[in-house]
Image (tube, helix red, strand yellow):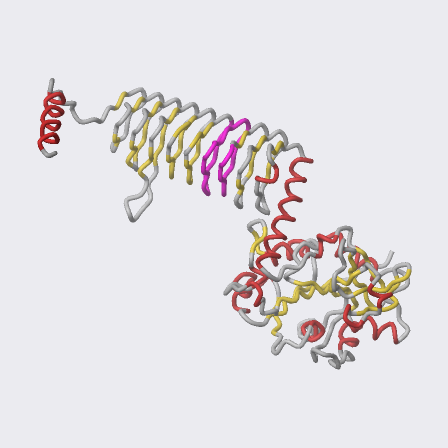
Amino acid sequence: MSEKRPIAAIILAAGKGTRMQSSRHKVLHEVGGRAMIEHLLANVEALEPAHLVTIVGESREQLHDALGDRCAFAVQEPQLGTGHAVQQAQAALARFDGDVLVLYGDVPFVSTATMQAMIERLNAADAPAAVVLGFEPEDPLRYGRVIAEAGQIVKMVEWKDASEGERACTLCNSGLLAARSDNLFALLGRVSNSNAQAEYYLPDIVNIAITDGHSCAVVVTPSPDEVTGINSRAELAAAEAQWQALKRREAMEAGVTLRAPETVFFSWDTEIAPDVTVDPHVVFGPGVTVASGAHIKAFSHLEGARVGEDCEVGPYARLRPGAVMEKGSKVGNFVEMKKAVLGEGAKANHLTYIGDATVGAGANIGAGTITCNYDGYFKYQTVIGERAFIGSNSSLIAPVKIGADAIVAAGSAVSRDVDAGELRMVRAEQLVKPGWADRFHDAMKKKKAAGK
């Protein structure tokens, strides 16, 4: 077995993205709560490449900020086609001797397995000069065609230049390509811009290599969805729908019950264990894990939260970053949690805000209770002990501690610590005036009648 060759990846991201109508760089628009270029990078990085080079143009400072030192950058200015874009990486790869993958930042879903298949085909016994990633869409539209026989490319042709017979071919060019570094840049140096756009096209290296008598190969992606390109808001929405459909299917295949799958939305890092039930219209933002046996009820929104075994969330609940629900705990309708831990078996069933707090096991938080955690400048902690009972419509003014088994009477505004086992009632004295309401009504009725 030959020694594994090093890999470099060139990611083209210099396009202006004018169809997005956005000040944000096109490849930083999100699918599943993650920038599209981050989806691609995650799959590339699984190959452990020796070099990553991103080709940038306008708004490149946004990519510098987003990607930092994870890759090298090369500037394409002016932008004279895909072949010209790849040439800009030549200096960064001057001393590199290995295999190069050419990818597109706005084609984010190419799998690691497909990239690996391209590299393996490049290193097959027949040693093709280049490997093209082809795909077979339901409607080939105006994509460039890959004319091939038994996996060997005969010709690459743009749709506008193709004959009727060539257009009948359904194998299309995704634009993605693999080649050895020395071959890639040598062939690019021979690409001409003698075309209607006066641009240098990357696929031309295949035809040049074939003319030289070298073979070139095509690898066909298992699914056309892998090479979905995103150039507009409509295509971004379509990619989101495609990605969400995949994640819903994966979740159900893994043992998650989705009562209305088309209404549930996941993020790229959502982790849901088997035997979780998710009701309609639930949104999982980034950073959510849900343990087995949990039930996420309708119209709930979770982000940056950890939901333990056998917990219940919602309906109409909101878990914000830092929310932790321990085993068997419950939050109900119109309950919000933020940077708070709800202990095992604890409950907050109605109309409650729990922020910057720790709630002990078995505690019960009554309807309308809030932790008053912010004074306009700083956040403060509320600590509620095990089995404590907080009566409805109470305000816990942080920093404050409620001891184990303590009871806070309904309607209390608690600003000092409550000891374990203590009852705390903070209410104004009730004033009773017998007959006052009857006299008030009589007087007001006479006044109203006199005004007619």
Q: Quadrant of residue 9?
A: bottom right
Q: Residue at x 62, y 48 (%)?
A: 241
Q: Is residue 7 above or below residue 407?
A: below
| Left or right: residue 279 compared with residue 139 | left
Q: Quadrant of the C terminus?
A: top left
Name the side, left or right, on which 228 lies relative to 291. right
The answer to whether residue 403 is left or right of residue 202 is left
Q: How many marks?
A: 0
Q: Where residue 289 sits in the image (x, y, percent)?
A: 55, 38
* Quadrant of the rendered image containing residue 42: bottom right
> Residue 194 in the image: x percent, y percent?
75, 81
Is 4 placed left or right of 379 in the picture? right
Report the residue that reaches farthest toward the top. 434
Residue 424 vs 171, above or below: the answer is: above
Residue 406 percent across, percent down from the top left? 32, 22
Q: Chief secondary structure of the magenta span?
A: loop
The front one of 29 and 213 is 29
Residue 407 position, x and y percent, is 31, 22
In this rendered view, identify the residue nearer to me: 251 or 54: 251
Residue 72 in the magenta stretch? The answer is: no
Q: Is residue 313 magenta?
A: yes
Which quadrant, please, contains the N terminus? Answer: bottom right
| In this view, 300 is above or below 26 | above
Q: Which residues are magenta?
A: 298-327
Q: Report which quarter residue 41 is drawn in.
A: bottom right
**Residue at image x 76%, y 53%?**
138
Q: Nearer the viewer, residue 123 or 285?
A: 285
Seen in the picture, residue 69 relative to 223 is either above or below; the reply is below
At 74% across and 71% down in the image, what residue appears?
202
